[in-house]
Image (tube, helix red, strand yellow):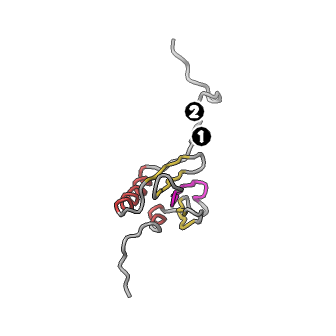
Amino acid sequence: MRASPPEAGSPAAPSPHREPPYTAFDRRELSEILKLYGRMVAAGEWRDYAIDMLKDRAVFSVFRRSSEMPIYRIEKNPKLARRQGAYAVISQTGMILKRGPDLARVLRVLDKTLKLVDA
């Protein structure tokens, strides 16, 4: 005996406009973050990280030592995308260092590579 498909109004039917249960970084965003993370680990600045996928935001926390508080948090908050930008870099003290709609531009605040300065 075959089961009939669920009715459109029944709770078992998937809703086309249903929000996901959590917010996460996509592959491109994670690639940008891990590229910076790899450079900072190679420089000896960072040693550990944690990823939290919460209902309203995704957080990539960076640690100098795993037993301490995170020195930086890279957050993605889709609800702020139209206002200030979905991405933010937050320091250990809670100060927002940079916020914006472009992750690569926001991450530049943490990148300590040497830059050529014209006089």
Q: Quadrant of residue 11?
A: top right
Q: Position of residue 63 (x, y in %)?
A: 47, 56
Point 55% across, 19% down: residue: 4
Q: Residues within 10 Å of mark 1 (few under 14, many from 20)?
A: few
Which of the numbered marks, if any, corresponds to residue 18?
1
Tell me whether circle 1 and circle 2 mark residues in contact (CB < 8 Å). Answer: yes
Point 54% across, 47% down: residue: 23
**Residue 27 among magenta residues:** no
Q: Position of residue 73 (x, y in %)?
A: 52, 58
Q: Quadrant of residue 78?
A: bottom right
User: In the depicted view, which residue is nearer to us: 84 or 88?
Assistant: 88
As drawn, which residue projects farthest toward the front? Answer: 67
Which of the numbered marks, if any, corresponds to residue 14?
2
State left or right for residue 33 relative to residue 94.
left
Which residues lie in the magenta part?
Answer: 70-81
Point 60% across, 49% down: residue: 56
Q: Secondary structure at mark 2?
A: loop
State left or right for residue 111 relative to residue 72.
left
Q: Secondary structure at mark 1?
A: loop
Residue type for callout 1: Arg
State left or right for residue 115 relative to residue 11.
left
Q: Position of residue 22 (x, y in %)?
A: 56, 44
Q: Quadrant of the C terminus?
A: bottom left
Q: Residues within 10 Å of mark 2 (few under 14, many from 20)?
A: few
Which of the numbered marks, if any, corresponds to residue 42?
none
**Residue 79 among magenta residues:** yes
Residue type for callout 2: Pro
User: In the depicted view, which residue is nearer to us: 21 or 82?
Assistant: 21
* Real-space Cα separation, disc 1 to disc 2, in angstroms: 8 Å
User: In the depicted view, which residue is nearer to us: 60 or 101?
Assistant: 60
User: In the depicted view, which residue is nearer to us: 4 or 33?
Assistant: 33
Picture layout, residue 16 above or below residue 117: above
